[in-house]
Image (spheres, rainbow, N blue to C red):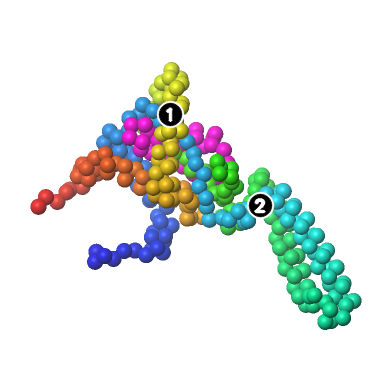
Amino acid sequence: MGKLAPDHKTIADFRKDNLKALRAVNRQFTLLCRQLGLFGGQLLAVDGSKFGAVNARDQNFNAEKLQDLLARADARLAEYLSELDGADAAEPAAAPLDKTQLAAKIAALQERQDWHRELLAQLQDGEEKQVSVTDPDTRKMPTAHGTIVGYNAQLAVDAKHKLIAADDVTNDVTDYQQLAEVALAAKANEGLMEAMAARMKAQPWKFKLRKTLAEHPFGTIKRWFGYTHFLMKGLEKVRAEWSLTTLAYNLKRVLNLVSFEQLMMAVGAKMPPRA
């Protein structure tokens, strides 16, 4: 309307305030695709990919990293205290740092040490092996190009038109358990998992197609959409963000498969008469 467009904060607030509704819209659109016959149900590929998050590497810690930082801080404190002793013995003009500057450096270092000790105690008292500060739900994860601090995004992709049948996000480093859960979600959408498992057992070569099928949506989202990291913080919010992203992928793909008029008719919307 009049070339008006919502600004970034308006969009961000809308997304933040409507997490459940956005995920529900995605589920309904998946059902609509099924109604249109766009899911084949013959082959379903389930896979995961790592995405960055709002948490820098230096704000993620494990016990080994914290113990190393504490040891380095101890060594640095010893240097500062030695310099402080030297400043006491030296002439005022000869000291490289005066006592006030050294005292400030010591206080800052001790404050950081206290924080690192708290993080280490948190790890030792709990079951987690790492802790992230900016977004506590993120984890350091291995990728083909090193490591990232982020989330593990999951997809179930139908082979007919490479549409996404189910999606999820986890902060577990490995895919094993998560892939099973996404497959169950896809079963809720299509009800074909048992028959598909039997076909896969009879035709094991189809396992090789899994990566190819899953790479299409992941590649489109990362390279074509330019979407390589999540913008929201917290696992539940990130799940809603991922759901919105997969909805955008499916919608774009569906509009290349059926006309806008067909889509609106399936929704039940009345189209205005053509001029």
Residue 62 is left or right of residue 148, and the answer is right
Residue positioned most to the right: 89
Residue that numbered label 2 is attached to: 61
Picture residue at 68% right of the left edge, 49% below the top: 62
Picture residue at 33% right of the left edge, 31% below the top: 160
Query: Could you say which quadrant of the image residue 117 lies in?
Result: bottom right
> For the image shown, how many numbered marks are present on the structure?
2
Image quadrant holding the N terminus, namely bottom left
What is the x, y in percent for residue 9? 41, 64
What is the x, y in percent for residue 242? 44, 47
Residue 262 is left or right of residue 197, and the answer is left
Q: Amino acid at mark 2?
A: Phe
Residue that numbered label 1 is attached to: 209
Q: Is residue 160 magenta?
A: yes
Residue positioned most to the front: 94
What is the x, y in percent for residue 129? 66, 45
Q: Secondary structure at mark 2?
A: strand
Q: How many other residues sit within 10 Å of disc 2, few (<14), some (14-19) or many (≥20)? A: many
Picture residue at 84% right of the left edge, 81% below the top: 92
Q: Amino acid at mark 1?
A: Leu
| Mark 1 and mark 2: Cα distance apart in space | 37 Å
The residue mark sitting in front, 1 or 2, is 1
In terms of depth relative to the viewer, which is nearer, 122 or 72?
Answer: 72
Marks 1/2 in contact by CB < 8 Å: the verdict is no
Query: Could you say which quadrant of the image residue 2 lies in?
Result: bottom left
Highlighted magenta segment, given as a residue range: 157-186
